[in-house]
């Protein structure tokens, strides 16, 4: 994978490590709620948890789902008010536990039914450290994948009832509550129960697994559909399908037993001997828990009488449980869409996974008006070329199978899942040899000249996710994610999966016959420009408060350097003043890029000199660091620096080290290297005026005056000579 370089992309190693906040092993706390802390608090005080972030009130039901009269009649009950001996799980978990309630969330339950078949995914979503007997305090938690991160969602166990009936899903076992509680957690993640009323099974599959889902339109099914479904079943994928007709109130049941606009779970696929040949059949489950297909291969159909007993006894059950078999042909004729989801698109290998592996790279970025939101019209090459660009290298492809999958997800405005979605998509261009040296960024000339070989996906319907799969020949390609119109703004997550045919004995021994090795190289787009754009919000500059948030959340994230503490507001204000060439109290993109480069430089030096892994430097380390930075200071000045920036133990944390070095380097570039000048800048920890610093006795030279104005960000347009000198010193650092 070859990413576009700064300013559009920079790979960050360790994105999927166990320690990373947002990884499966260290999920983010949704709404900053810590399950263990809240449960221990309730247990210590004999309380049952009540969640004020998703309260047992009308607001959690949401508008439009029920009439005002019905909303007034909603009653909230804890499981121990419903049954005497409630249990989270009774006799294990399976799809037949689930019975859909009054909410039209079949899309969620169909995905959930598939989740119960794949324990490696189910255990990620449903933590085992909870129940009604072990430390019960009315609190539970579940985990979902949310825009690139796993999040832990805490809920109380108050469930909504209307007219003595579950409003939400319930279990076939009256004293089992995992379906109802999991559904409540997902409703909280999405915003309300109303947000579960109609939706896309494709989204639920991804949210429950963190995987990639591929959508097959069955009006024109791939010729190898049965192969795909069988490979998906063998490689432990989640699968679902939908009926045509759209979502509407009271979806009609057809004469053949299927329901218009309804979502189902695909639970299996096989072939059976039938008459003088073989028949491909697919198994499907209705999340209602009843209502089955009445055509060929249904329960009780004559086709089963022609199947050998040894096959029939393993496949056939005549039960009214919502599950049924049908032929592959009937499946593709009756259903409109098939969705398959796994960590990697292993099902596209058609059972040949032991020879292949899939790599995945993930980028987080955003389209910004006037900067990176160029729209989808590549005939307007000037605008289109502003979109983010991501390079991929396809080598030694097997042209019999798909080898590239691209998944693009938009983050809804204000993190509200059902907010107005944009028309998004991506285009893929083959990069010919004359442009292959331009790995930083392809110019306008490329998009003006090369338009013959273009793969274009979506820009048709406003969906959250756009996914497509390709069979590409060897070569270099560029993936360009875009909105349909120019200057539309949104944050996006791009994942690119590449099928590898590198084969060796180590790979062979490490691969399961049903699950490919998931090789992940994931990255957030933390180039200087994209970091700046994430925190600049609506403006084109960032102030000291935004800089503080940025440095603590991005630059110190997952860093050993953060052990010594974060950047305080005063430090950020001082750093901003030193970088603020325009003297307006804010940083422009160019000024920030200069700062970002300095930060990276000093982080490397800090890591090199900090040998104890404590997050601090001592005085001798500071001396070495200053020398590595190419700065010459006297022992007297070094002592002053240590006094100013160290703690009571004479140790310096990373954030203070950065503040010190940026000031010191700025002084050196301006020729302010004497002890008196440095003392004026460093003593006391505050930005002093000339009169306040006058006690030092030697601050009336032009250089010293300049240094004070520089420290305060107070250079004015009248200081032209001094400003030219400062700009000359800084310009060499700009990219």
Image (cartoon, helix red, strand yellow):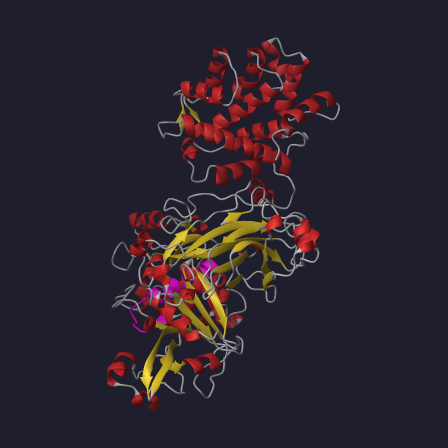
Q: 133 left or right of 622?
A: left
**Coordinates of residue 563 in the picture (x, y in percent):** 40, 33
The residue located at (34%, 61%) in the rendering is: 354
* Residue 87: % across, % down: 28, 64
* x and y percentages locating residue 666 in the rendered image: 59, 23
What are the residue bounds of the magenta stretch? 170-191
- Would residue 544 be counted in the magenta stretch? no
Q: Would you place residue 85 above or below residue 302 in this image?
A: above
Identified at 45% across, 50% down, the residue is: 31
Q: Nearer the viewer, residue 44 or 589?
A: 589
In this picture, residue 227 sits left or right of residue 69: left
* Count of numbered tags: 0
Question: Is 654 placed above or below 523 here?
Answer: above
Asked if residue 113 shows in the view, the reply is: no
Q: Nearer the viewer, residue 232 or 349?
A: 349
Based on the displayed image, in which of its 4 quarters is residue 164 positioned? Answer: bottom left
Is 321 or 600 nearer to us in this picture? 600
Q: Quadrant of residue 564?
A: top left
Check the picture and name the quadrant holding the C terminus: top right
For residue 178: magenta? yes
Task: Note whether residue 610 is visible.
Answer: yes
- In this view, the residue farthest toward the top is 697
Q: Residue at x 27, y 67 (%)?
A: 92
């Amino acid at each position: 994978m070859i990413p576009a370089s700064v300013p559009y992309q920079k790979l960050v190693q360790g994105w999927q490590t166990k320690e990373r906040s947002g990884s499966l092993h260290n999920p983010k706390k949704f709404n900053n709620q810590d399950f263990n802390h809240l449960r221990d608090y309730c247990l210590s005080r004999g309380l049952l948890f009540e969640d004020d972030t998703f309260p047992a009130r009308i607001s959690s039901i949401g508008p439009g789902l029920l009439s005002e009269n019905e909303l007034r009649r909603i009653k909230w009950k804890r499981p121990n008010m419903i049954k005497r001996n409630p249990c989270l799980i009774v006799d294990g978990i399976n799809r037949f536990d689930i019975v859909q309630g009054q909410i039209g969330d079949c899309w969620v339950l169909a995905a959930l039914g598939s989740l119960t078949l794949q324990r490696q995914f189910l255990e990620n979503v449903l933590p085992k450290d909870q129940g009604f007997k072990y430390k019960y305090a009315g609190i539970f938690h579940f985990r979902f994948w949310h825009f690139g991160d796993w999040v832990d969602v805490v809920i109380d166990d108050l469930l909504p009832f209307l007219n003595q009936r579950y409003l939400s899903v319930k279990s076939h076992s009256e004293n089992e509550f995992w379906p109802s509680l999991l559904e409540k957690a997902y409703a909280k993640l999405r915003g309300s129960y109303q947000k579960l009323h109609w939706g896309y099974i494709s989204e639920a599959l991804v949210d429950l697994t963190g995987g990639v889902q591929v959508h097959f339109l069955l009006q024109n099914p791939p010729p190898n559909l049965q192969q795909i479904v069988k490979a998906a079943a063998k490689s432990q994928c989640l699968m679902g399908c939908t009926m045509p007709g759209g979502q509407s109130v009271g979806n009609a049941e057809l004469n053949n037993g299927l329901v218009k606009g309804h979502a189902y779970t695909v639970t299996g696929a096989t072939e059976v001997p039938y008459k003088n040949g073989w028949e491909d059949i697919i198994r499907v489950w209705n999340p209602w828990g009843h209502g089955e297909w009445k055509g060929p291969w249904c329960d009780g159909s004559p086709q089963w009488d022609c199947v050998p007993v040894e096959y029939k006894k393993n496949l056939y059950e005549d039960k009214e449980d919502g599950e049924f078999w049908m032929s592959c042909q009937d499946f593709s004729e009756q259903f409109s869409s098939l969705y398959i989801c796994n960590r990697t698109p292993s099902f596209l290998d058609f059972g040949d996974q032991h020879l292949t592996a899939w790599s995945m790279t993930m980028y987080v970025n955003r389209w910004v008006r006037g900067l990176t939101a160029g729209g989808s019209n590549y005939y307007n090459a000037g605008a289109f070329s502003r979109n983010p660009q991501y390079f991929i290298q396809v080598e030694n492809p097997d042209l019999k199978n798909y080898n590239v999958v691209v998944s693009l997800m938009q983050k809804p405005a204000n993190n509200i899942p059902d907010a107005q979605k944009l028309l998004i998509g991506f285009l893929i261009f083959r990069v010919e040899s004359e442009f292959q040296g331009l790995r930083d960024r392809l110019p306008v000339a490329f998009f003006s000249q090369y338009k013959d070989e273009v793969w274009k996906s979506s820009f048709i319907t406003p969906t959250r996710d756009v996914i497509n799969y390709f069979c590409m020949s060897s070569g270099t390609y560029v993936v360009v994610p875009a909105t349909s119109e120019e200057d539309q703004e949104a944050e996006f997550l791009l994942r690119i999966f590449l099928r590898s045919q590198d084969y060796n004995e180590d790979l062979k021994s490490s691969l399961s016959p049903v699950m490919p090795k998931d090789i992940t190289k994931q990255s957030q787009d933390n180039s200087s420009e994209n970091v700046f754009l994430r925190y600049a919000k609506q403006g084109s500059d960032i102030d000291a408060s935004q800089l503080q948030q940025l440095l603590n959340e991005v630059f110190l994230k997952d860093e050993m350097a953060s052990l010594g503490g974060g950047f305080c507001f005063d430090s950020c204000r001082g750093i901003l003043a030193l970088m603020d060439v325009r003297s307006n109290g804010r940083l422009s993109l160019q000024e920030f890029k200069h700062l970002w480069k300095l930060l990276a430089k000093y982080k490397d030096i800090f890591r090199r000199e900090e040998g104890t892994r404590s997050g601090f430097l001592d005085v001798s380390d500071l001396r070495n660091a200053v020398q590595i930075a190419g700065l010459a200071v006297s022992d007297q000045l070094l002592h002053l620096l240590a006094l100013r920036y160290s703690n009571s133990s004479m140790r310096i944390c990373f954030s203070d080290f950065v503040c010190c070095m940026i000031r010191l380097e700025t002084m050196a570039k301006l020729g302010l290297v004497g002890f008196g000048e440095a003392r004026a800048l460093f003593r006391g920890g505050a930005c002093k005026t000339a009169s306040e610093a006058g006690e030092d006795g030697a601050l009336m030279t032009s250089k010293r005056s300049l240094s004070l104005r520089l420290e305060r960000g107070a250079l004015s347009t009248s200081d032209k000579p001094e400003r030219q000198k400062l700009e000359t010193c800084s310009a060499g650092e700009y990219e």
